[in-house]
Every structure is written in structure tokens, then in C-alpha cells.
Amino acid sequence: MKILTLGLALLPFAAHSETAPPAPLLPSFSEETTTAGVDQIFAGDWEYMVGGGVSTFDCNADARPDLIIAGGTNPAKLFVNNSAKGGDLSFAETASGLEQTAVLGAYAIDIDSDGIQDIVLLRQGENQLMRGLGDCKFQNANKGWGFDGGNAWSAAFAATWEKGQNWPTLAIGNYIDVTQDMFPWGSCTDNWLHRPDGDKFAPPIALKPSFCALSMLFSDWNRSGTPSLRIANDREYYKGGQEQLWHVNPGEEPRLYTDAEGWKRLRIWGMGIASYDLNFDGYPEYFVTSMADNKLQTLAEPTDTASKPGFKDVAFAKHAIAQRPYTGDDLNPSTGWHAQFEDVNNDGLADLFIAKGNVDAMPDFALRDPNNLLLQRADGTFVEAGDRAGVAAMGLSRGAALADFNADGLVDLVVVNRREPVQIWRNTTQTGNHWLSLSLSQTAPNRDAIGAWVEVKTGDHIQRREITIGGGQAGGSLGARNFGLGDLTEAEVRVIWPDGTEGAWNMLNADAAYSLQKP
């Protein structure tokens, strides 16, 4: 690694559009589940119908993404990445201290900024902050860090560093009251905001009202320099609820954005959140998974001083609605879970993976529901390629992660299935397209520069990516981010750091990994 210091499925009637741009390069994935050494099943009954998260992070500083995978009633497992560069995927299950049961999800974050990743375990019962000790070992730090893990059905997480704080602010999303199994409707429990108090956490703040959260993301939707907290909520169980966006301003109590501020009421079965600046206007778009009603939201009136969170849904127009299975004979509506934007063919355009799967055996929804791989085309629309690319698995998928596991510049894929084995695919696409792998670091606090923006000039566009922790379905990715460059052999790169400092543009040679360090 080179170290630098820097100053949705197509609707049938649209499948043959006369104005459709050239088809994007078709990626190819090879399933290596039986040989990669990743052996885990997310097990459990009703109280584990959601969750099933997987997170990628580097636990041993070898620049290879490792895996923490929730197990539900099975213990969570850590898999250390031993993949050779450009070779087959290879992982080894490793005793780590993370082998807890009742885990729905996990996220990596360097809480104490010691340069070693810690892990947040979301559980049925007490959530746990697991302090990284180095060499992929962890120990419970709830007591030492003053963290109240509560006793709830926790399924969502996000984190940010508020200005002036050495420790992060953690948001935890809670689902229904597990004791109300005979009639759970209307039993949503409070979400929590854990703010720091020096080098530990203050008692949690209840985010009222709460509407059965399944995904959370701190994101700077208007580029103000202060992220807001987006929450995807499951309308199946709330009463009078909706999707939410919270002001989380330093030194102030959290408060909801209101209709008067431009927030538009939206009621869906919110499952997972993914974000990316798809249209190169400098602001992130948001994809929110649901049941037959996935949303791709963009600011309705983006300006240089965007202040109103008024979003319009463009999923239908962009062919990204992915509302039904695109292969097989099941025509019932789909159920979406994890979503993630990544450039799987390195053409410089972010593509979209969606994990799909019935809650269990709901007859009004597809029982055989293939995962989606939507390739972005030059005009910003998407075309389905999951079946042709080899990732149209039919399991009850939940969490997922895309990351470059073997350092060949192509992002690979791992998917967690409910009550079935985890699956993993190696990206074997034959392409002449080029790429960059970029990771960020700065001095404490917030060593991984959460809240920064990475910008890469490719042709007439600037790719922009916000560095976040959260979103997805009970898991996410922390570490290097891949950028496709198409046929470019070099590209200019800069970082806008969390404190607003704009680094200088630097020309980087393609097909290499770089660590970008704040001066």
C-alpha cells in the first residue's frame, strides 16, 4: 500500500427502451462458499427474523478486510482474511472474544481512537462494546466505557463524531418489544442516542418517538458540515409512524426535522439504507429498501446552500425500483434488506446490490426472491444483471457486504442468509478498466475520518463518497473504498476532512492502494 499525506430491476416495458444507452460491462462472480472457509448460519426463530449482519474491517493491520458475522442463536464468528493477491478467497475462523450468542448485527469502529478497531454487537438483550486489543482479540468494555447496553431487540446502528468531542456519538435502533410476541403491532421500543462524556459515554437519550428502526445512518445530506441521523422504520409494526430524519447538533438536544423544514412524510417497510452521490451534484442520494416499495431519493431542489430535506423518489425513473423477482416464476412482491453501492465493474459508475428474501414464509411476498445486482449505465439508469453475473441466490438473504477481499481491484461479495449458510463470491470480471483503493487516516480523535468526503476526478465527473458508519442491514464496511476509473490510468484525488479542511488535489496512478493521511 502506498501512503500519501494529502493537504433495480428494469420494468418489463422499459427493457427495450429506444433511448437506452449502451449496456455496461457485465461482471462475473464465482461462488466460493465451500472453499473460502466462511462457515456461519444466522439461526433463530421469530426474534431473529431481522438482522443477520456482516461487517468488513481489518483486525490485524494486513490491509485485507476481515469478517465479523452475526449468528443469532449461534455464536457470532470472526473470519480472518488469508486471501492471496488476485487468488481464491480464503478465510480462517479465529477465536476472538466476539463469540457471543443473541447477536443480530455488528459494526466496526475505533471508539477510543487507539488505532485498533473495536466492535459494536447488536443483540437480543444487552448490546456490547467490544474493545479491540490487537491481533484480532476483543474484550467487553461496557463497564469501563460507561456504556449502558440496555435490554432490547437492537437491529440498527450508526456513529458520528460531533464537533469538539474525542469520542463518537452512537445511535442504536430498537425494534419491537420481544415480550409482545402474541400481538407485536404498536410495540415499537425507544431508539437510543449515546453521547460521549469525556472518555466514556453518558446515559443514553431516548429518541422519541421511535417507530421500529431497522437501519440508521449519520449523513451530511446538505453538506452543512453537520451530519443528520436518517432512520428507516418498519411500518409493519408502528402506529402513526414514518421514516425519520433527526437534527443531531453539537450541544443541543436531538430533534426531528418537521414538515415546515421540508421533510416529507414517507411510510414504508424501511429495512436498509445505502448512500452515494449518483448524479455528481455533490449531494448524496439514498436508497432505502422495503417490501415491494424500494425508494431511491434525491434532493428535489439541490443548491449550493441546500437547507430543506425535501427528497423526491426516482427509483421508477432510474429503473431501480426492484419491486419483484426478475427471474424464476414467483411474481409476488420482493422483500429488500441490505443495500450497498459499489462499482463492481470499475467503469466509474456506482452499481447497487440488494439482498432479498422473504421474512420467513409470508405468502403474499415472493418465496423465491433473488438478490439484485443493478448496473448503472451512463445516463444514470440501472439495468439488472444479478442472474447473468452469477449472484441471483434464492436464500432468505439479510445482511451483505461488498469489499475487495483479495486485493485485485475488484469488489467481492458476502451474503448472510437466515437459517442457511453464508455465501461468498469472488469477483472474476475480465476487464481492462482501472481502479483505485483509498483508505483514510488522521490523528486522534476519529482516526478513520468518519464524516470525510473522498473525491476522484474521472473524465467530466467527480466521484464523491461520504465516509460513514451505519446503514445497511445490521452491518457495514469500514476500511478501504474502491473507485473505478474506466480506461483512465491515473486520476486526481482529494479529501475533504471531517473538520472541513479541503486537501489538495493529487494525481495518483491507477491500479494501486493508497492510504491518504491528513497533514
Image (cartoon, grey):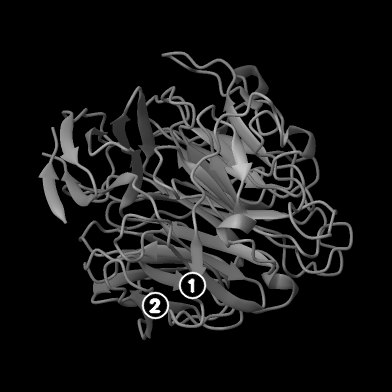
In percent of the image, x 49 and y 78: which residue is there?
Answer: 76
Q: Quadrant of residue 96?
A: bottom left
| Nearer to us in this view, 269 or 210 | 269
Disc 2 crowd rating (10 Å Cα; few below 14, some 14-19, many 20+) is many
Q: Quadrant of the C terminus?
A: top left
Reading the image, the residue beneath label 2 is 79
Residue 46 appearing in the image: yes
Question: As shown in the figure, which amino acid type bears the numbered disc 2?
Answer: Phe
In percent of the image, x 24 and y 71: which residue is there?
Answer: 60
Instruction: Please tell me whether residue 288 is drawn above or below residue 121 in the rendered image.
Output: above
In percent of the image, x 49 and y 53: which residue is there?
Answer: 27
User: What percent of the width, then of the height, locates residue 507?
Assistant: 16, 34
Q: Quadrant of residue 163?
A: top left
Taking 218 as reference, is 50 left or right? right
Q: Give the SS element for disc 1.
A: strand
Instruction: Please tell me whether residue 151 is drawn above or below residue 232 in the rendered image.
Output: below
Q: Quadrant of the N terminus?
A: bottom left
Residue 190 appearing in the image: no
Instruction: Please tell me whether residue 406 is drawn above or below residue 15 in the rendered image.
Output: below
Indicate which disc residue 69 carries. Answer: 1
> Distance between the Cα atoms at labels 2 and 1?
8 Å
| Nearer to us in this view, 199 or 277 | 277
Chain-order first, disc 2 or disc 1: 1
User: What percent of the width, then of the height, locates residue 464?
Assistant: 37, 33
Question: As shown in the figure, which amino acid type bears the numbered disc 1?
Answer: Ile
| Nearer to us in this view, 463 or 496 | 463
Question: Label 1 near label 2: C-beta < 8 Å?
Answer: yes
Q: Residue furthest right?
A: 363
Taking 189 as reference, is 68 left or right? left
Disc 1 crowd rating (10 Å Cα; few below 14, some 14-19, many 20+) is many
